[in-house]
Image (spheres, coloured by chain):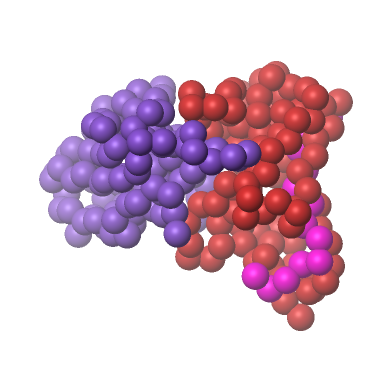
Chain colours: A red, B purple
Amino acid sequence: EVQLVQSGAEAKKPGESLKISCTGSGFRFTTYWIAWVRQMPGKGLELMGVIYPEDSDTKYSPSFQGQVTISADKSTSTAYLQLSSLKASDTATYYCARSYYYGSGGDLDFWGQGTLVSVSS
Amino acid sequence: QSVLTQPPSASGTPGQRVTISCSGSSSNIGSNYVYWYQQLPGTAPKLLISRNDQRPSGVPDRFSGSKSGTSASLAISGLRSEDEADYYCASWDDSLSGFKWVFGGGTKLTVL
């Protein structure tokens, strides 16, 4: 069974950092792109970036370039999303999802359960 | 402002057929596949339609996708209360540098 299991909810203070994990199982992790998607409260889906765990090739959406860091550890089939200098506006649910292709033919066919991040003083 | 444009809301009564539109341009929908995702309240999104009109395993045939020119549509026939959700279209945009996946802003479907 394909699964993407994300780390649990986090409550942080402004200025702190955070690293969310997404662990895949039931499929060959290194042959899929892993995408990170942000959903702010009551808002739509925003693609943040993707990583190919086999060689850590990473691509960021312009809106998130320089603001977040995406990484992966293929030995543990885990992708990470790092957020630094957190602000209240980083409060959101963050999802990981997989795609076999990074291209026109790529769809996000399995999603993690989401990680709720709350940033408040 | 999303690259793909969807109506913010749609509604229908049980049993009715509803459609949700997704408008783009020649650099995205006009020359690339369209995908649709369903997000039920409080849950993660789920792939509903792949490559314009392909239903993944387990998706009821009440859901169908189509594309014409620079627009795409999701149709839901025999509307049911459990279809109440947010629906997002997505595509690839050749005109963007770097990251090329784009989402629509989402449509909230209400079953009256």
- Give, as a single range, the part of the protein colored magenta: A76-89
The answer to which of B6 and B24 lies nearer the viewer is B24
User: Is residue B89 inside the magenta stretch?
Assistant: no
Residue drawn at x 21%, y 44% as measured from the top left: B19
Q: Position of residue A25 (x, y in %)?
A: 70, 27
In the image, residue B112 sits, relative to residue A59, either above or below, namely below
Quarter in which the C terminus of chain B is drawn? bottom left
Which of the 4 image quarters holds residue B8? bottom left
Q: Is residue A110 left or right of residue B56?
A: right
Which of the 4 image quarters holds residue B69? top left
Residue drawn at x 77%, y 67% as measured from the top left: A86
Q: Position of residue B105 (x, y in %)?
A: 41, 54
Quarter in which the N terminus of chain B is drawn? bottom left
Q: Position of residue B75 (x, y in %)?
A: 23, 38
User: Is residue A86 inside the magenta stretch?
Assistant: yes
Q: Position of residue B42 (x, y in %)?
A: 49, 55
In the image, residue B76 sits, relative to residue A63, either above or below, namely above
The answer to which of B99 and A113 lies nearer the viewer is B99
> Hey, which residue is sitting farthest bottom in the picture?
A121
